[in-house]
Image: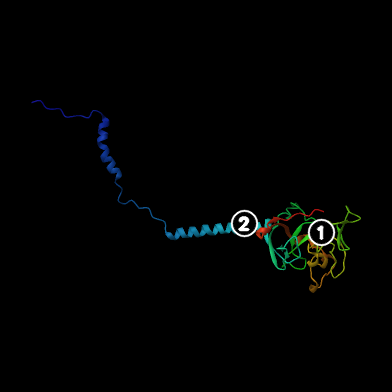
Amino acid sequence: MQETPKEQPNEVSDIFKKQEPSEQKEQTQKPLNEEKPVAPEKGGKFLTFVLDLALNLLIVFGLVYIIQTFIASPFKVFGPSMCDTLNNLNNECQQGYGEYIIVNKLIYKDFFGWSLSQPDRGDIIVFHPPHTQEQFYIKRIIGIPGDTIKLIDGNVFLFNEDYPTGYELPEEYLNENNKGKTNPSTNRETSFSVPDDQYFVLGDNRNESTDSRSCFRDAFQGGCRGEEAYFLPRANIEGKAWVVLWPLNHIRVLPQADY
C-alpha cells in the first residue's frame, strides 16, 4: 500500500508564518512585576497653579509700576484753577474733583542728558509745588529759563533775547472772566526773571489760581518766602498733561499753546 506523502512547507517563510501567533501572544503578555504609572498628586497641581498665578501677577504689577513711574499715569484734576481749559463740566467750573487726565511722564525724562522734549511755554504740567512733596498742582508754563515775565495792566508780557522790548502773550485759552485780568498777588510783585532750571507758571483761571505769583501759597499760608519761591524747579515737574479720559463726552487731546 502506497503511503501518502506528508505535506512539506514549500518555503522557509511558511515556518515563520506559523510561529507568528505564538510570538504575538508572548509579546502581548506583560511582565507581572511591571510598575503602573503613578498619577501626579493633586497638591502638586495646585502648587504649580499658585506659583504660575503669582508669577503672572508679579509681571502685571511690575509693568503697571514701570508704566506709571516712567511713561504715563492717571491724574484727577482738583479745583477751578485751570478753567475753562480743564474741569469745566456742563459750563460750570468744578470746585472739587472733576476731569481725569493722562500725564505724559516720558516726554521730559532725562536719559543721560537727553530727553524727548524740554518743558516749554504753553505746556500744561503736573508738579509738586516747591514747599511740599505731598501735593500735586496743575498749571501752564508761561516763562522758561532766561525769560522775564511782566504783568502790565492785567496782561502778560514776555521779555527775552528775541523780544527785548516785550511781547504780549496771545492767551487765547483764557475765558472772558480772565482776559486782561492777570493781576499780581498780595505781594504786588509784577516782574519775574526766571532763573536756570526753573519755570514761571500760571493757572488759566487767573482769578482763582494759586501759582507763581503767590509762590504757590494762598493768602492763608503767608504767600512768598524768598525770591526764588516764585519759580518752579525743573526737578519738581512730574509730566505734561496729555489727554482727558473722563467724562466720556469730554475725551480729547489737550491742545498746545504756541507763542
Percent position of residue 232, x then y = 79, 62
Percent position of residue 214, x then y = 82, 68
- Residue placed most toward the observer, 63 or 39: 63
Residue at 69% over, 64% down: 98
Circles 1, 2 touching at the beta carbon (< 8 Å): no
- Residue placed most toward the observer, 13 or 69: 69
- Quadrant location of the N terminus in the rendered image: top left
Can residue 197 be seen from the camera position used here? no
Is residue 140 rendered to the left or right of residue 99?
A: right
Give neighbour class at mark 1: few <14, some 14-19, many 20+ (Cα, 10 Å): many
The circle drawn on residue 258 is none
Tell me the kind of residue under disc 1: Ile
Tell me how many marks there are. Answer: 2
Tell me the kind of residue under disc 2: Leu
Element marked by disc 1: strand
Residue extending furthest toward the bottom: 220
Element marked by disc 2: helix
Residue extending furthest toward the right: 165
Residue at 65% over, 58% down: 248
- Quadrant location of the C terminus in the rendered image: bottom right
Residue at 79% over, 74% down: 220
In the figure, 215 relative to 118: above or below?
A: below
Residue at 25% over, 33% down: 15
In the figure, 202 relative to 107: above or below?
A: below
Percent position of residue 90, x then y = 70, 63
Q: Nearer the viewer, mark 1 or mark 2?
A: 1
The circle drawn on residue 63 is 2
Residue 227, quarter of the rendered image: bottom right
The circle drawn on residue 142 is 1
- Residue placed most toward the observer, 245 or 133: 245
